[in-house]
Amino acid sequence: MAAPPPISTEEFSALMAAVGPFESAPHVAAAVSGGGDSLSLGLLAEVWAHGHGGRMTALTVDHGLRSGSAAEAAQVGRWLNERGIEHRVLAWRGAKPTSGLQAAARKARYDLMTSWCREAGVLHLFLAHHLEDQAETFLMRLGRGSGIDGLAAMSAVVETASVRLVRPLLKVPSGRLKATLRGLGQEWIEDPSNRDRNFARTRIRSALPDLAEAGMPPERLAEAAGHMGGARLALESAASALLARCCMIHPAGYAGVDGAALAAAPKAVSLRALARILVCIGGRTYGPRSAKLERLHQRIVNGGKDMSHCLAGCRILPAKLNPVEPRRFLVCRERRGSPLPLAAVAGARILWDRRFAIEFAAANGKGISGAARLTSLGDDGWAAVAADRPDLKSCPLPMAVRPSLPALRDDRGVFAVPHLLYKRDSGDDPGVAFARLRFMPPNSISGAGFCIVL
């Protein structure tokens, strides 16, 4: 067989156009471990960025899991610096888990890189997943019994709250990436973990040649993932249209849902929309198991009888019935698993309850009554607020939502609850105040979206 050709500058520009658009003079980042695939991406991305009046920063994560990992990261830096490419090493510090190490390392890697991009103002993070990676992911998820979402495998573009994750090489064989490095006279690092058969991906990778002989080459498997991606896109679009009609998200972190509209939609679309609501309001990364989701969905289809239910960190209950909206229901934060009290410090920025992005500022009262703490309002806090401000008993926020609201307390009790427009009028304060508060769960009601390159 002829050696695979390298990727030309023009071909890479066409691949980038498929995952655009990009701003003028972009500053982009690329995950570069030093392996042949990621190093090739880094060199191609640098040429592309420079050609568009921008620049590229290569990010190498040192997990600290192998002796020599720091030296390898330094070697990557030397290679890139010789070519005038900016490079940063991000270290994963702290204790490492004894189980689920690969998943934990992957999460740490993405957290470190997306955090760096957010702080540097970089909007796009390039990842070097290629054709064989897509085929392997499809097979792994097929083996787990995944549905359409899982079998769609990897998206070419994922838009997160911090950065766009961009995979321009999903249709490019790994051999062509290494051929690109050979053409440039560039060495690369071979990660020994890629040969460790304790990992499922390694075992599947070793089976690819036999599958190709049986008529299932990586191109065919990736094509199947692409077909599933098209089906996923259609379902996501239909679910988004349904949510626009039937769901209202409130900044206080709850949803009002038209159960009749949800029940009337095709089941596959309705289930997807319901899962999105639960993931958003519960502050979850993933939705509930399908069996539990279907049981809740059946309650909704049955007309909302016996609706009160808890699932995925959410409490689902009927709204006040009226002749216009007889089947409307609420989805709010479940009380179980509420976050523990947290010290409130002026200038601090936190993600509280996995749902609220909160910034604190110094307060300007006459004195300080005690250490400030961020807590859920709770039943006791609501009782105190209602006693101090009886008019708030008729506020529009549903009673079931009020205990989960973020509240600032001091030694005297509740000091401020922004969603209730409440602030204790006593002439003193705990020395800190809410500066900004946003409902910002890890997954919005619209989801991250999915993109396939046709």
Image (cartoon, rainbow, N blue to C red):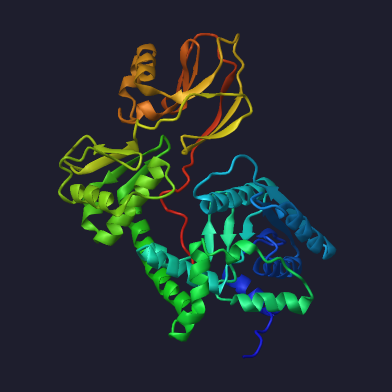
- In this rendering, the count of numbered labels is 0
For the point 66% across and 75% down, the residue is: 177
Would you identify the image quadrant in which residue 238 lies?
A: bottom left
**Residue 175 location in percent, x, y?**
63, 78
For the point 24% across and 52% down, the residue is: 294
For the residue pair 198 and 37, the one nearer the viewer reads as 198
For the residue pair 355 and 65, the one nearer the viewer reads as 65
**Residue 353 location in percent, x, y?**
46, 34
**Residue 376 location in percent, x, y?**
42, 26
**Residue 383 location in percent, x, y?**
34, 16
For the point 56% across and 24% down, the residue is: 344
Would you identify the image quadrant in which residue 346 lies?
A: top right
Would you identify the image quadrant in which residue 420 lies?
A: top left
Does residue 149 sit above or below 64 in this rendering? below
Judge left or right: residue 170 versus residue 377.
right
Does residue 395 sit above or below 196 in this rendering? above
Q: Looking at this view, name the residue that lies furthest to the bottom.
A: 1
For the point 39% across and 62% down, the residue is: 149
Q: Quadrant of the N terminus?
A: bottom right
Does residue 421 sit above or below 204 in this rendering? above
Query: Can you see residue 452?
Result: no
For the residue pair 74 and 86, the one nearer the viewer reads as 74
For the residue pair 435 and 452, the one nearer the viewer reads as 452
Query: Can you see residue 98?
Result: yes
